[in-house]
Amino acid sequence: MSDQRTLTLKEFHADARARFGENPLNWAFQCPSCGDVATGEALRAAIASNPRKHSTGQSVRFTDVLGQECIGRSLGALKGSAVRGCKYAAYGLFPGPWQVTVPGRERPMFCFPLAPAPLAVVSEDGGASS
């Protein structure tokens, strides 16, 4: 898996855009625990099919957990019923491996590394291409 890395939010966004384009639905992350690679689009679909709420009562959106949770968490891994992925979260007991410094936050945000290669690209209108 990927080595630990610390970067600013600006650097993180620049790396993601350079590798996958402007659309966060195309950004792909690799789970450091199980190796599953998931795009924002795959995570959005998983959350839509298995809605859940934050402790505040607000619905979880894919942008809330993109790059911070393995897709398995949204597909039922916490209940033992995921068809892929695992229950690993970058903000859990073993954080990271990447740290992103975010303006206005005292502590860094932990996240998964970007996937090593682009997957299918989702256009702005939602259509997929490769």
Image (cartoon, rainbow, N blue to C red):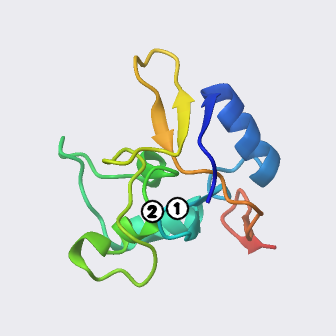
For this view, does 1 lie left or right of residue 68?
right
Relative image position of residue 33 (x, y in whole percent): 47, 64
Considering depth in this image, is 115 or 45 the residue closer to the camera? 115
Q: Quadrant of the N terminus?
A: bottom right
How many angstroms separate mark 2 from mark 1 (CA)? 6 Å
Q: Is residue 59 above or below residue 116?
A: above
Label 2, secondary structure: give it: loop
User: What label sits on residue 70 in the rendered view?
Assistant: 2
Q: Mark 2: which amino acid?
A: Cys
For this view, does 4 lie left or right of residue 20?
left
Q: Residue at x 33, y 52 (%)?
A: 60
User: What label sits on residue 31 in the rendered view?
Assistant: 1
Q: Is residue 94 above or below residue 13?
A: below
Considering depth in this image, is 126 or 107 the residue closer to the camera? 107
Sequence-earlier tag: 2 or 1: 1
Q: Quadrant of the C terminus?
A: bottom right
Q: Residue at x 45, y 54 (%)?
A: 62
